[in-house]
Image: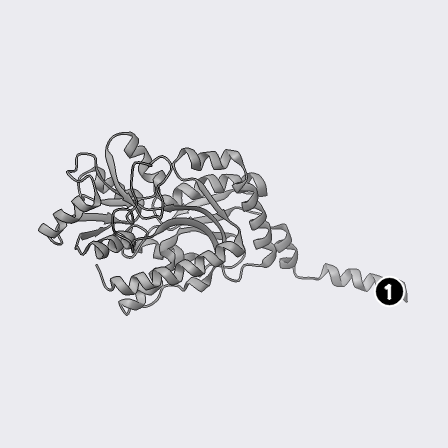
Amino acid sequence: MQRRHFIQSLAAAAALPSAAFAQEAWPTRNVTMVVPFPPGGQADLAARPIAEALRRSLGQTFVVENRGGAGGKTGNAAVARAAPDGYTLLMTLASMLVLPDADRLFARAVAYEVADLRPVARVLADPLMIAVRADSPWRTLADLAASARQAPGTIPFSSSGSYGALHLPIEMFAAAAGINLLHVPFTGGGPAMNALLQGTVQVTGGGPGVVKPHVDAGTVRILGNTGNERVDGFMGVPTCQEQGYRDVEFYIWAGLFAPLKTPESVITRLRGAMRQAMADKAITDIFEKGGSPPAFLDEPEFKAFVDADHKRLSRAVQVIGKVE
């Protein structure tokens, strides 16, 4: 009798859904890491070293897929709607927090909700560097503001899309300075910077790692940063707050997210791999040398950070209101 029960137990175990075992084995195939912008921007700079570190740690290829559009909304929404199986992840920027608010502001259909995505780990957290060409007449934010007052709405600045990680902080500066600038949206930070270099626009923004090669090459000048302190490698550049724009504070952070209902077993393995990656000197050196020092937060701390930043940036969207 006991032997028969033992055999029945083995048979029942063999009949368990394979998904239960697949979760523990994750990953058993390639994982897609969506970057909702073209190559060359802050999210892309964060994604590529991390994808390589995860490949080494977890034994499967992490494919970085640049899926730009609508200031990041297209890629964010695609991951929010993806199967929550651990095979589609998102490396995105702070703008993901305010794009749903912007949709509501303009009475548009909301593409996704912030709550549809689960924070896993923060990788970078840089202030935005407000940049002009090196041959620009402006050397301070006050110089730029003075010119903008003389010709309202005519000085063009590029962004990664409406209410995106480059648009919102420059609008925050414009509101604090009492000026109007001409917004020219692109599909990501890389194209936005190219527009400045080519002279299509006169102002743009970017993380330190994005602007550093152009500053080093002598083609770009930085007028200010949107953090609350100066940045290593740019110590001669004062913050917006130091220059009198006290309400301007914005961080162009990059973080890893998963669809909300991703199994806990997958999240646990992913968090462990992210902790390992962000403790790896080979990875952190890439960020340091690129001008964007690592700013790791594990899931609990990152979620608290996201919740607080969401509230602050949502208020900023309401203050700025509808801008094109």
Q: Position of residue 249 (x, y in %)?
A: 33, 52
Could you say whether the residue bearing mark 1 is in a helix, strand or loop?
helix
Residue depicted at 26% across the width and 67% down the height:
106
Q: Position of residue 239 (x, y in %)?
A: 30, 45
Residue at numbered disc 1: 4
| Along the viewing direction, whichever of 223 and 259 lies nearer the viewer | 223
The outermost residue toward the top is 217
Side (left or right) of 301 relative to 127: right
The outermost residue toward the left is 150
> At label 1, which amino acid type do we have?
Arg
Side (left or right) of 322 relative to 49: left
Residue depicted at 43% across the width and 37% down the height:
287
Q: Position of residue 15 (x, y in %)?
A: 71, 62
Q: Quadrant of the C terminus?
A: bottom left
| Along the viewing direction, whichever of 214 and 87 lies nearer the viewer | 214
Q: Is residue 98 visible?
A: no
